[in-house]
Image (cartoon, helix red, strand yellow):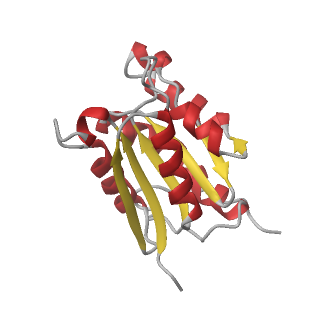
């Protein structure tokens, strides 16, 4: 059996230019490492916050067997924050419940969560989730939505993701 691949994509002009170190992508990898018992490997990229570059990276990761892609950055209202648009352009189905729940959870911590445009969608057999850029927010958002992620990946015929139930419990309906 092959190792499960999960894409981690940071969209940041400054991090991609080396102005500062990306801490958001590694925060996603650390969180997923806590969550997953399944053997997996990250496919990690830091790219400019440019819609066409983001679209190209999402397509490449999805079409090269990443069952899940988690993005960080580019979800705010600024002119260059176009990750949700890139996600919508490459997905065949949008999954708005992910963004709705993430904003609801984030509003418990900061009133500016309403400015975030996180979303999720499906491209073929890949679930793509857009997260905010701050590591604390990344963990809060993933804690909220990740229980549904393994079952979503089951439904789109991706690999079986087993979680570490001491950290997070995946929800899967009982089989009759």
The extreme top residue here reads 111
Instruction: Determine if residue 116 is in view.
Output: yes
Q: Residue 110 in the image: x percent, y percent? A: 38, 18
Give the left or right position of residue 46, taking residue 20 as reference. Answer: right
Give the left or right position of residue 88, taking residue 109 as reference. Answer: right
Q: Residue 131 in the image: x percent, y percent? A: 45, 37
x 49%, y 34%: residue = 51
Instruction: Determine if residue 170 is in view.
Output: no
Give the left or right position of residue 88, taking residue 82 as reference. Answer: right
Quadrant location of residue 108? Answer: top left
x 35%, y 38%: residue = 48
Q: Nearer the viewer, residue 24 or 79?
A: 79
The extreme front residue here reads 52
Location of the C terminus (image quadrant): bottom right
x 30%, y 39%: residue = 135
x 43%, y 65%: residue = 36
Question: Looking at the picture, does residue 94 appear above or below residue 28?
Answer: above
Q: Nearer the viewer, residue 140 or 42?
A: 42
């Amino acid at each position: 059996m092959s190792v499960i691949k999960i894409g981690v994509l940071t969209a940041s002009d400054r991090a991609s230019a080396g102005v500062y170190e990306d801490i958001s992508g590694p925060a996603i990898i650390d969180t997923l490492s806590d969550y997953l018992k399944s053997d997996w490997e990250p496919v990690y990229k830091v790219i400019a916050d440019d819609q066409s570059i983001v679209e190209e990276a999402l397509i490449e990761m999805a079409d090269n067997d990443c069952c899940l892609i988690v993005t960080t950055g580019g979800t705010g209202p600024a002119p260059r924050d176009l990750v949700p648009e890139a996600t919508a352009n490459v997905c065949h189905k949008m999954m708005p419940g992910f963004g709705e729940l993430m904003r609801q959870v984030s509003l418990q911590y900061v009133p500016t969560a309403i400015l975030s445009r996180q979303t999720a969608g499906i491209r073929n057999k890949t679930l793509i989730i857009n997260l905010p850029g701050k590591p604390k927010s990344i963990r809060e958002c993933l804690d909220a939505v990740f229980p549904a992620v393994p079952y979503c990946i089951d439904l789109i015929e991706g690999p079986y993701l087993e979680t570490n139930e001491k950290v997070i419990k995946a929800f899967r309906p009982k089989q009759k």
